[in-house]
Amino acid sequence: MHIPFTKMQGAGNDFVVLDETAGPLGLTPAHYRRLADRHFGVGADQILTVRPAPAGQDVDFEYLIHNADGGEVEQCGNGARCFVRYVFDQGLTGKRHIRVLTRAGVIEPQLQDDGRVRVNMGRPRWQPEHLPFDPQGLPSEQVGQAQRWLLPLLPEVDADTEAAASQSEAVWIAIASMGNPHAVQVVPALEDALVQRQGALLESHPRFAQRVNAGFMQVLDRAHIALRVYERGAGETLACGTGACAAVVCGIRMGLLEPCVDVATRGGRLTIEWRGGADDDVWMTGPAETVFAGSIELPDDLGSASDAATA
Ligand SMILES: N[C@@H](CCC[C@H](N)C(=O)O)C(=O)O
């Protein structure tokens, strides 16, 4: 099958954007993995699909997100900024402020005059059941308004054994959902953070039934953080929009941050605003750019073979 696409990026988090406004392309998880593949495909952290608004919904479009591993997910913040840039530039809408339906609810991205995009990302949640996260039996502490848990990263074995004591590696995590799940650590120095090792262990930790995105936040001052995120289904990316929202929400709830925070990621700068109330929406502002457009030939029968290989 012949698939036209647009390659985009927001703070270095990169996307293949597909247009399904004229009808479904009929892609399987294996097709998404091939599109995301940096050697055999286009290369991307996520695949974003634009669909028409479902009947009866007060939105302009529907927005589907697939991680590089082919799995569908609820939300993608950097993708949301690229989404409005894409539909506007392609002439799919004349509006600069749109309402978009995601698997996690409605978000509202708007193109600003300065070329950046501001998005109402909706309300954060921090109750364990919203991720979901199973905190039962874990040591915990209250930091400001937030709760943190001491999570062993290696398999939890009988704590009485010597082996368990010598193997124990545990990290303090706060949690937040932006529609998708995030575990956030405050680290003293980002360059020393064990992002690859701990990120991989956290991502598939059995206490997160839907897996999790792992954030590593260094607080620079009350209005600036540096952040790296090991993303569920994609590994470490140059930036994660929902990860930035989640880190700032956790930092504000811990009493470490003010309501407007500049987030330095490895791929660019994001601004996150949140007034701190359970009913307050989180706002994210950042860049969204088109890199190139093209088309790719994908084998129709990619599905079963690749699915079997990664099962
Ligand atoms: N890069 C994204 C998040 C994409 C989804 C995430 N990996 C998940 O599985 O929840 C962002 O900018 O928010």
Image (cartoon, rainbow, N blue to C red):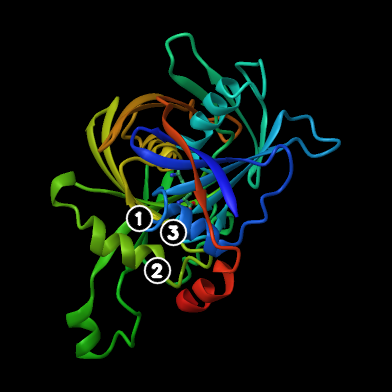
Q: Position of residue 240 (x, y in %)?
A: 39, 42
Kindly identify the amino acid type of the residue bearing the numbered disc 1: Ile
Q: Position of residue 63 (x, y in %)?
A: 63, 40
Task: Bin the neighbour count of mark 2 within 10 Å (Cα to Cα): few under 14, some 14-19, many 20 and up.
Answer: few
| Residue 252, numbered label | none
**SS of the residue under disc 2:** loop
3 vs 1, front mark: 3
Q: Is mark 3 within 8 Å of ligand 1?
A: yes
Q: Position of residue 270 (x, y in %)?
A: 36, 28
Seen at 67% across and 27% down, the residue is 99
- Give how far apart the Cα atoms at labels 3 and 2 are: 26 Å
Q: Name which quarter of the figure residue 260 lies in.
A: top left
Q: Which residue is mark 3?
A: 233
One can see residue 250 in this view:
no
* 126 up-or-down from 203: above or below: above
Among numbered discs 3 and 2, the one appearing first in the sequence: 2
Kindly identify the amino acid type of the residue bearing the numbered disc 3: Gly
